[in-house]
Image (cartoon, rainbow, N blue to C red):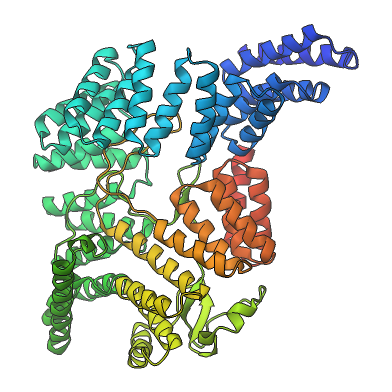
Amino acid sequence: MKRLVRFIALLAVLFVLGANEQSYAQYNKRYIAWASRNMLASDNYKEAIEILNVLIRSDKESYEAYYLRGYAKLGLGDLIGAEADLSRAININPVYTEALHYRGIVHAEMGNYEDAVSDLTAAIELRPDLPGSYYSRGVTHLRNKQWVKSVVDFDMVLRFTDKDAQTYINRGVAMLGLRDTLTAHENFDRAIRTNRDYTEGYNQKATLLMSEGKNEEALEMFDKALECDSTYIAPLFNRALTLCRLERYQEAAEDFRKVIRLDPYVTSAYFDLAIVYTLLGDLPAALENYDLVVEHAPENVKGYYNRAAVLLEMKRYGEALGDYSKAIELYPDFANAYLQRAVVKDIIHDSDGAKRDRAIADRKIAEYEARLEENAEELALWADTSRKFNQLVSFESRLTERKLSENDSRQTTIRPMYRWSLKAADSPTDNRYYSPLLAEAAVAADTTIVFTNQPTRLSEEEVAKVNSHYEEEAYQSIESLFRWGISQLVMRQYTSAVNILSEAIGLSPNDPLLYLNRAVTRAEMIDFISSVTVSEKMTLDADMAISASSTRRTFSYDEAIADLDKAAELAPDLAYIYYNRGNLHALSGNMPAAYDDYSRALALAPELADAYFNRGLVQLYLKDTHKGSMDLSKAGELGIKEAYTILKRYQNRQGR
């Protein structure tokens, strides 16, 4: 019935327009604006856009029509389209408060916090009596970790109304950022008193209690949160962690299984469930879940390392040996993996191999401890090489890397960054984009070195042999030092590679390719550290509501981006620099900057398929499916077959 009423209303509007479109009356414009606002209030965004398109064709100066269409596009997730329409409304009417407010929200959703704050501040200056812009600016500051500024804005919101539970929650999270846990507790308590049916108040209170080790109290609060909403994953996951702390493993396992039923892409749930099954002595079930961890996160060291321990317990020694070797391949500085592999080798009577592994482990631990004595801050750059990775991980732990989320919760990997790497005899080459700078680089003369974004095809033994050769020649020239840095990166000796490349840059500060490779090294080191470090972070959902706990550690690509900025300054016409920087902006969540860099790369190298692919993903993320699909189509045309898989997925979704 409601759909019929909407259809009749739409026909009425179109009839009025069609009957007298040339002499369009002001009354009819107001009627359309009224009708479209009613549709927007009922979340009927597509129908609203249809009649607003007619109004805009009739009156291209109707700032209200552009505003309403921008609002509708925001509701549909089309951030780029929403920004364009809201900007058009503001250009026509620079003092249009609502348009400024919602463009600020769009900018915040796009990760453009500076412009978001600017728009919201302008809206506040025009209408200081409206709390909405203070709230949105407070959330933007919260996202940008400007804790004090966010508290000021939330205080202002609460002057208008003291009955908004989410504002108390947001202010509490800001207080956690300021390390004021007492005031955070007070805000979460106030949120609960304000709305006792609002699950997030209980969730935030419980999460804080959990972080303080008050497990029984936390469990009670998580129970209340789930009474309000039994499908809310965050409190369900954290309740499972709390139950584990209380050694109530059967109940914890059931909660983790519920999380997986609700969202099969929460990789950390498989990881923690595997640990719980191990504690319960159900090794086959533990193994099954570690298999899923490795399937979802094929470069996660902890998945292989822990699965190897289960396989060892099950006396499946060959498979255990393979998993320990894979962990070492992913992270050659992981001393404990060498020690455990030595145990397996002893069991299978490979005494010499076990002895070699123990010697390597001893050397790695000694190097780690020496570095720690020299500079305790380097702990952040070196994953602990001696501890066991069998602790539970948080809901927000980064077990998957280099992903852009999509609407259906599936994840698609962006194409990797370009760097100098080691070349195998059968390594493919891509000559669609020729660069004199790359062709004339001194390291390009070495037949074992290639500029690529694909992993080397050399075996571990072949890489080690090349690295030993480069190490012997390292200080004969800048080029030889660069080659050694390249081989160290391929071996995942990140700290060593950064130091070597920094030394080379000190000797040759105007070589853009040194900065490019150091940027990639730094970025890959950050990716790896984040994959082996339990990292809790604060997130916000699509409604700009806080949905997770306090931040313990964050990882930043700023140094890598700074290296690429310098490389671009030295070699402004090298497309790969902008492509790489686009990747880092995308991984940092700054999608507009990523889009701009990919576009710059394509302006310089129109056949760079990877840039089309990644720009297409960014545009899909920003809900510009038409342009994103065009870019993916071009990427497929240029040889990236995965692009067609993604296009098919989106076409199927459009057809539903």
Residue 517: percent from left, percent from top: 45, 72
Say which quadrant the N terminus sits in.
Answer: top right
The quadrant holding residue 122 is top right
Q: Viewer-proximal residue, 645 or 20?
A: 20
Judged left or right of residue 471, residue 514 is right
**Would you place residue 293 above or below residue 441 in this image?**
above
In the displayed orientation, state which residue is furthest to the top: 27
> Which residue is painted at 44% across and 50% down in the image?
588
> Which residue is painted at 60% across and 25% down in the image?
71
Residue 613: percent from left, percent from top: 59, 58
Judged left or right of residue 266, residue 429 is right
> Which residue is painted at 52% across and 67% down in the image?
567
Residue 280: percent from left, percent from top: 12, 50
Q: Viewer-proximal residue, 629 or 212?
A: 212
| Residue 645 visible in the displayed image | no
**Would you place residue 26 above or below residue 92 in this image?**
above
**Would you place residue 215 above or below residue 434 in this image?**
above
Q: Viewer-proximal residue, 150 or 74?
A: 150
Residue 327: percent from left, percent from top: 27, 70
